[in-house]
Amino acid sequence: MSFEQLLALVLDPDLLERYGPRFLDGLLVTAKLVAISFSLGAVLGLLLALARMSRSLVLQRMAAGYVYFFRGSPLLAQLFLLYYGLGSLKGFWQDVGLWWFFREAWFCTLLAFTLNTAAYQAEIFRGSLMAVAPGQHEAARALNLKRSTTFFKVILPQSLLVAIGPLGNELILMIKASAIASLVTIYDLMGVTKLAFSRSFDFQIYLWAAVLYLVIVELVRRLLKHLEGRLGRHLN
Amino acid sequence: MLDQLSLLSFASGGWGQALLAGALVTVSLALACLPIGLPLGLVVALAARSRKRLPRAWATTFSTVFRGLPELLTLLIIYYGCQIAAQKILAAMGYQGEFLINTFLAAMIAFSLVFAAFSSEIWLAAFKTLPKGQLEACSALGLSKRTGFFKVLLPQLTRIALPGLSNNWLSLLKDTSLVSTISLVDLMRQTNLAVSVTKEPMFFYGVACLGYLLFAALSGRVFAFIERRSNRHLQGARA
């Protein structure tokens, strides 16, 4: 077998020309999906963590129930529940004027991913907030700092240093989970792959996708490691 | 609400039986991954700790690949990959005709590999907590390497690895919902079918979520029991 034949088996130039640009689009969609839902999930997750640590029992219970539900059931079921379930209440959404949102698979997916990752991030934030030494709270109060100043300037920066590792893991899990979006007609990297495979029946398409995902995950992992080192540089 | 509940009845027209059968497939698929996944994970962890370079490289590649790939993609690659490979082999042997691989088998292989990759990390971390003296004590007692590993190291490893493995088990249970995409009729697939017939997506997907939550809660109980059991030698000392 010559080199060209071997190359055609794993990287067919014709196939690459036909589907390469689509793969780039898919990559972009995946990136957007993960970036938006992860950052919105971080905000919601932080609020949930604060609710779980609040003094109000109602807030605590509600946040705990939310986290339990979204961590205990599969993302796929949650996505279908939102997309097909909420999407079936067309009359209601038209009355409230939100039909444009629940009509679109894109928004439903974003919502499902945000709600899901928020539950996981809430647990990460809770753990990292509890890891801050209690003396820090007392010191802040002794300095007569406002509660908001204490939280944003003293507690949060220290807890983020603890949280960054688990948050990175969650980001990677999120990148992998985003492949599920392809099941509700989103053309992310996985969606494009399935489309290309259903047209060409060439197995190498799946291998391209595998390599792309592996490269992304490895890049993100390296980047996070670097970031973690930088954030903790005062400790060395 | 009451007429919706009747959709879950076991009589004809109700989906109770179908959903229960699907749930059974989900649980048996997840359980079927353990006999391969657990030992394979341990083997990968052992290979990663080996002194030779080849097993180490193999273990790193294995765990990087199967931890880095989306589970959906792994599943599809194994499913279509096995199918195409089997077809090629059969064609070379002169067999013409369609060959369809069993979806349960493909899913079992795929999830076993993923489970092995994730649990190998847990085993590795557990290895690090074992004092080196244990190994030395084994050789001082003249135990063979085999006995030392199975009778001394492994019981301690298992105890330390249990919480991590229970996490892996829970994500395995949730990942099995992906097999509905290769038309294996598990809980998720039955739910999809029920929705397409009854047009009650909100209700049925809600029920499916609750079903998975129930499994998670049950396995939580089981793991709590096993953990208590494997730590029972410590409780006596504390009391």
Image (cartoon, coloured by chain):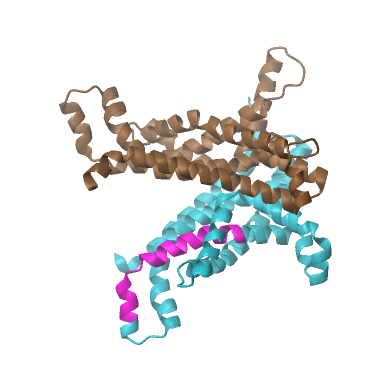
Q: Is residue A226 found inside the magenta-colored segment of the image?
A: no
> Residue B109 placed where, x, y %?
57, 30
* Left or right of residue B170: residue A24: right
Q: Colour of chain A?
A: cyan
Q: Residue furthest bottom?
A: A144
* Left or right of residue A76: residue A216: left
Q: Residue at x 66, y 61 (%)?
A: A111
| Relative depth, front residue between B106 and A127 | A127
| Relative depth, front residue between A184 and B184 | B184
Q: Residue at x 31, y 84 (%)?
A: A142
* Left or right of residue A179: residue A219: left
Q: Residue furthest left?
A: B140
State whether residue B110 is above or below residue A151: above
| Relative depth, front residue between A213 and A132 | A132
Task: Work out whether residue B194 can be spotted.
Answer: yes
> Residue A25 placed where, x, y %?
70, 55
Q: Is residue A134 found inside the magenta-colored segment of the image?
A: yes
* Residue A131 quadrant: bottom left
Q: Residue at x 32, y 71 (%)?
A: A134
Task: Work out whether residue A46 can be spotted.
Answer: no
Q: Residue at x 70, y 22 (%)?
A: B87
* Residue A230 quadrant: bottom left
* Left or right of residue A25: residue A75: left
| Relative depth, front residue between A98 and A229 | A98
State whether residue B68 is above or below residue A4: below
Give the extent of the magenta segment.
Answer: A115-140
Q: Colour of chain B?
A: brown
Q: Residue furthest top?
A: B94
> Residue B232 placed where, x, y %?
30, 40
Q: Look at the image and tell me in which quarter the N terminus of chain B lies.
A: bottom right
